[in-house]
Image (tube, helix red, strand yellow):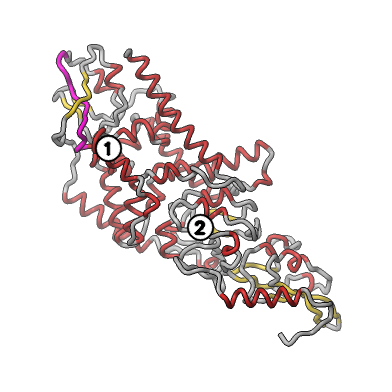
Amino acid sequence: MSGTKVRTIRWVIQLLFLGLFVLAFIETRYPLPVTFQNLFFRFDPLILLIVSIALRAVASAFLLALFVIAATLVFGRFFCGFICPLGTTIDIADSFVRRKRTHASGLRPVKYFILIFLVAAAVLSVSFLHLFEPLVILERSLTLIFYPVATFLAGFVHLGSPQVYTESALALLVLATILGLSLFSERFWCRNLCPLGGLLALCSKFAVFKFSFGAGCTGCGVCENICPTGAISVEHARIDAAECIDCLRCVYECPPAVFRYRLAPAPSPSTMDLSRRHLIGALGTSIICAPLARTLLHQRLSDRLIRPPGSIPERDFLNACIHCGKCMKVCPTNGLQPCVLEAGIGGLWTPRLAARIGGCEKNCSMCGQVCPTGAIRKLDPEEKTYAKMGTAVIDRTRCIAWEQDRVCLICDEACPYGAISSLSETIRGTTLLRPFIDEQICTGCGLCEARCPIEGRAAIEIFSIGEERMRYDPYITEEKIRRRACEEKEEDLPAGFITDN
């Protein structure tokens, strides 16, 4: 097969997987049923490793990643060369860079240090996976950068794209940095920084099939110069299996076609240099950064940190959430927005309910359906209505009914649970209907805050008071059912009828 055909086949495969990733992203939207949206994440071994360690439980949703590990032990680091959508995106960016680049092979061990750092931090029950995981980075970039722009240009702003603020700017900075590293060398991120690449590199070192030099090499050095990961050493006639991503460039660029892909069960020599000093440095960094992840919490907004319905307890939530942004993308009201420092450094890009932008619709449970890790539990629509995210609180100094003595029943009408009642109350000699909140029934959905008619900060706001965050227990209880049933009965009574309740 000619080199042109091999090159074409490789690009077709790469673009196919990138297209599938983008298609899964596009299909992650309300109200479409969940099908294959999380498929790429399910096969990610780095997510399996870090989430399982951080949660102290096997992340069973990602056991398909074991097939990638097994295949890597047989065929080498093919995932990086053919499947990884971020790797393909980097290849596309590399194709526009024409200046001479250097390989900077001395930075190769950094990806192993980052991997050790992630594992050590996970042992300390802190996950930094969202900062370095390639699939998560690309998914989040599509959600916070490209999707808002695309929906705005298409005129579908009402569908609810995330707000382009600080969170989006940070996501753009991360992606631009990764792609901009192409100015220094091809696949700089994959070669030097990617922890998933480091994990697969450790496995591919023991791959059964490897590329190797055959007879007839002229020592021209073409293969060494075009290898995107610097895995080839012509001087030593050696290919580092840990760095080789099976991209086939050496095969179709070599003038005498000397490269062979064959059975080589013995572990290959590697240029990996993990000195004790660097190992201690990686461990020490994790020990320092782990507690910092819980600090710099925006205390002023901490009681306004409303998580999606069905979110597991906060500590587990931060370890399970990979900050991919899927829940924010499917939110039909655009109410789920990414955090900056409301949940500390470790909570960057995690979802929070910004009720002033949009509340949580009663019949929607999409955020839990698309969450790939179970940080947001998959609740059926009925149980979701019993998940308490917080409690509404009325600021009477801003409320039209309480402060201005004018009739306003909007929050009462907006509440789908009957938690807000308009009762006659005399203030300053004026008797009219004013809103009262039943904290036992209120779920903190925020629809009242979203629809409050006053300008600026709403007169009724959602706080995390009374939030329920359970990892396994059901949200539906007999007591909740009884209270809701009593409220529904009272609503059916004639006007002016007084009950003992």
Label 1 to label 2: alpha-carbon separation: 32 Å
Q: Pointer 2: what residue?
A: 378
Secondary structure of the residue carrying numbered label 1: helix
Residue at position x 63%, y 64% in the image: 445
Q: On the rendered structure, is 169 left or right of 248?
A: right
For marks 1 and 2, the one nearer the N-term is 1
Q: Where is residue 226 drawn, in percent x and y?
A: 30, 22
Residue at position x 60%, y 59% in the image: 354
Mark 1: which amino acid?
Answer: Thr
Quadrant where the C terminus sits is bottom right
Secondary structure of the residue carrying numbered label 2: loop
Magenta-span inclusion, residue 213: yes
Can you see residue 10? yes
Q: Pointer 1: what residue?
A: 72
Question: Which stretch is magenta?
Answer: 205-216
Q: Where is residue 312 drawn, in percent x and y?
A: 46, 64
Q: On the rendered structure, is 391 left or right of 420?
A: left
